[in-house]
Amino acid sequence: MTLSPTPSQTVGPFFSLGLCARPCNVLVADGPLRIEGMVLDGAEEAAPDAVVEIWQASGAGTYDSSFGWGRCETDGEGRYSFVTAKPGRVDGQAPHLVVLVFARGLLRPALTRMYFPDEAGANAADPVFASAGDDASTVLAQAQDGGLRFDIRLQGERQTAFFEL
Amino acid sequence: MDPPYDYPDYRSTALRAPRKPLLRLPQTPSELTGPAFGEDAVSEFDGDLTRQHPGEPLGERIVVSGRVLERDGRPVRNGLVEIWQANAAGRYAHGNDDHPAPLDPGFTGAGRCLSDADGRYRFTTIKPGAYPWRNHPNAWRPAHIHLSLFGRAFTQRLVTQMYFPGDPLLEFDPIFQSVRDPGARARLVSAFDWETTSPEWALGYRFDVVLGGPSSTPLERQ
């Protein structure tokens, strides 16, 4: 039996009613890693009505269904943040977060990954990171005071590299 | 099957649709695993949107139910299903909704539940009203309920909208019409359901959801 999937539709502008009623962006209380960034549109304008979800492995590099998922809606300035701990390497891949972006104007979510700036060697050897080619820098977080910065550009010259879902 | 990112009739896609070709992703554990939610993710009144306030909401009481399935027909068990919607007058209890229709003190319009062992989910709610938006002149969204679903793998994540059968606005709605395949579009429309229609209480609508993603290709089951 093969059933046909239900199509995606946009989250629209009012998702925070249902999706963000309870904050889900602290994966590890007082965790050692703070990730923040903005969601930007093709005019480099902040998207104040986007929601970013992440899925990550534990520090040991294993996936556990009870840890590793987070969700954060962007604020009025298009900013989101997560407090977590760095994932380990899974099956030889460079440490990374799976990142899914939903927004008004996105009829289906945009899927990307976030890689770590202190993992140059592992990143270079990671086939998914390498597949982004010239756009690999768009999936690489930047170190900043107190954590990492990862901006997501939905469109434009500097568009984030997105993957097929 | 899914709508394109770029769909000019839905104006908000213009500056938000990714334009670069999507990259192929191999199926690694990152793609084949996902979060699970326990009973603590939902509380008593989360599945009944008509009982979240001291007073009852206005409008037509309905039961929305269905099954969450993978493509091979297996049920998604303990999958988190979240919904949000406008009230019977077509107004969202959201600060940015400025449609001049009344808010309902008896209705927030947000719910959640976990699917059971057969993948079944069920909500009691109010039929949402249609509402205007500014996409084009005299634009109206057909009545709809937003649904967010989790499968076994994070890449099966789905956010969609459920519509009601016979709605004359469907033909003119760019968000519904963005799904170009008529068969796929039809899967977004719920079916009137005698089975969940309760005498002298509520009308039933059935909406089954099939998650795509990695289950569509053979893989080792956990």
Image (tube, rainbow, N blue to C red):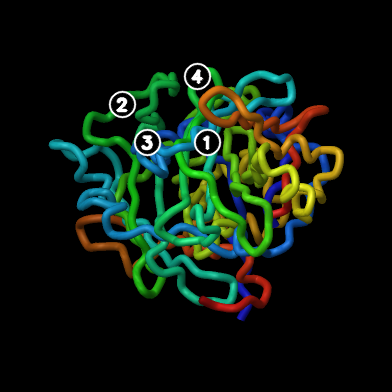
Q: Which residue appears farthest toward the bottom when viewing the image?
A: A1
Report, in whole angstroms, how far the alpha carbon at label 1 lies from the one at label 3: 22 Å
**Residue A30 tag number:** 3
Residue that badge 2 annotates:
B103
Local crowd at mark 2 within 10 Å, few (<14), some, or many (≥20)? some
Q: Is residue B34 left or right of residue A106?
A: left
| Helix, strand or loop status at disc 3 | loop
N-terminal of the two: label 1 or label 3? 3
Q: Which chain carries label 2?
A: B
Q: On the rendered structure, is B17 left or right of B189? A: right
Kind of residue at badge 3: Asp
Q: Which residue is drawn at 49% across and 31% down?
A: A81
Disc 1 vs disc 2: which is toward the camera? 1
What is the three-letter code of the residue carrying label 4?
A: Gly
Sequence order check: which comes first, mark 1 or mark 4? 1
Dot 3 or dot 4: first in sequence order is: 3
Residue hosting label 4: A76
Identify which residue is drawn at 48% across, 36% down: A82
Of marks 2 and 4, the one in the foreground: 4
Taking A67 as reference, is B56 above or below it? Answer: above
Spatial distance from mark 2 to mark 4, Cα to Cα? 23 Å
* Callout 3–callout 4 Cβ contact below 8 Å: no
Residue drawn at x 47%, y 55% as measured from the top left:
B149
Image position, residue A45 (x, y; %): 66, 19
